[in-house]
Image (cartoon, rainbow, N blue to C red):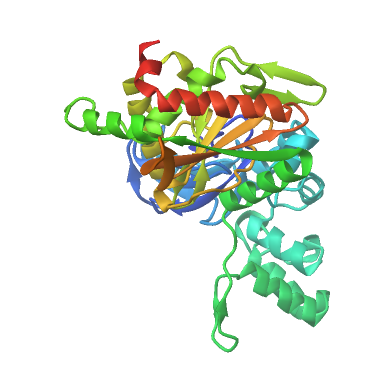
Amino acid sequence: MLANLVLMPQMGISEESAILTQWHVKKGDTVNQGDKLFSIETGKATFDVESEHSGVVLELIASEGDEVLIKLPVCAVGTAGEVYVSETKAAATVATAVEAVQPQAVASLGSVVNQEAVQRENAIKGISPRARALASKADVDPSTATPTGAEGRIIERDVRSLIENGATSPVKAVEAVKTVEAGTANAVEGYQEKPLSNMRKIIAKNMMASLSQTAQLTHTASFDATSISEYRKLLKADPVLSGVTLTDMILYAVTRTLKEFPLLNAWLMGDTMRYFDDVNLACAVDTDKGLMVPVMFGASSKSLLAMSKELKTLAEGCRNGTIAPNLLSGGSFTVSNLGAFGIESFTPILNAPQTGILGVNTITQRVRDVDGKMEMYPCMTLSLTYDHRAVDGAPASKFLQALCKNLERFQALLAQ
């Protein structure tokens, strides 16, 4: 009988591969349905994968650190004595999987998965991702290596042997090995190199694409934060509402103000604009693995308290890796708050194809003239970056004016 093959799951519609970061079981372990098998990292988050079957772990097909295409096997679970489809046979599905991917989707991964390379390597019995990466760096043909892995698979040590036997120049071979082994301290030269995480690669690629493909301009305006500060103090005394923060109030005001400025609650998609009926508010969240931007759908119809609770749930899901992939895309406008770090002004980068993103800064004390007398007041600045291809300076400025006005009379906004 055939054992059950556990396949690399697809955690989001745009994901075509994932990195297996950690095994939680080993060969020979007994697992039950629902037990944690392994952890993976995609371009957006990290996830734990649970077993759908009960039985014995017969084989770990992929290794920690391997990048595996979606729907390819990573391990086999069954009863002792059962057989499983060998990796050689499973590898035959790689070309089919890659051919089904649109070229732009493959390019968007920003990863080591290369369509032509995968198709070419199908002629080999099988090659591990680490071996593939080393062969690419050293500019050698992995098909000429002598396979020593299971089922005739070419693994990293086979490519290393190929390099050491003169398949490429010594200098290039050394550079390739150093690149693949980045992260090892160089005691002589006094530095360390570590490979970028898959998430960091995606963030870097998206940021560069945003700056190079959009016409970004930033306006900054300030408002008197007395109203929201006093309302926050009032809420602190209420056990139900005490969790509502200044950030929650700003998000609430943003959703109500955006309803009057559809150009900023939209996507610019080539020659067309997509205007959203509701505000699907994306909120930047700092995590140990990098910036994540979960989306609060239909935020313009939610109460302040409901928004506050949902934002905390989304942020917690991002930080512990349990956020659902569908909640990491689809936003119509983004807010990024650096006020907690004491930042007084910054230039947020658009989350394309969105046409606007708001940067929230810290509260500072300023002086103003009131009837000939100087008085101090709490002041907060807001930085709006917008795509000048879709939005002109006047409507962008009017949005900031309206938002500042709504925040200065926040309790009146709540009554509307």
- Residue positioned 61% across, 46% down in the render: 347
| Quadrant for the C terminus in the image | top left
Q: How many marks?
A: 0
What x and y, as percent, mark residue 133? 70, 60
User: Residue 98 at what x, y percent from top left?
Assistant: 74, 37
176 versus 236 height, above or below: below
Pinpoint residue 323: horizontal percent, then vertical percent. Answer: 44, 34
Q: Nearer the viewer, residue 387 or 12?
A: 387
- The answer to whether residue 50 of the structure is visible from this angle is no
Determine which quarter of the picture holds residue 386: top right
Q: Residue furthest bottom?
A: 188
Closer to the camera, 266 or 183? 266
Q: Residue sitting at 46 percent across and 31 percent down? A: 324
| Residue 235 as seen in the image, left or right of residue 23 | left
Q: Residue furthest front?
A: 372
In this picture, is 26 found above or below 322?
Answer: below
Residue 105 in view here: yes
Residue 115 image-quadrant placement? top right
The residue at the point 46 percent across, 20 percent down is 299
- Where 151 sits versus 71, above or below? below
143 lies left or right of 278:
right
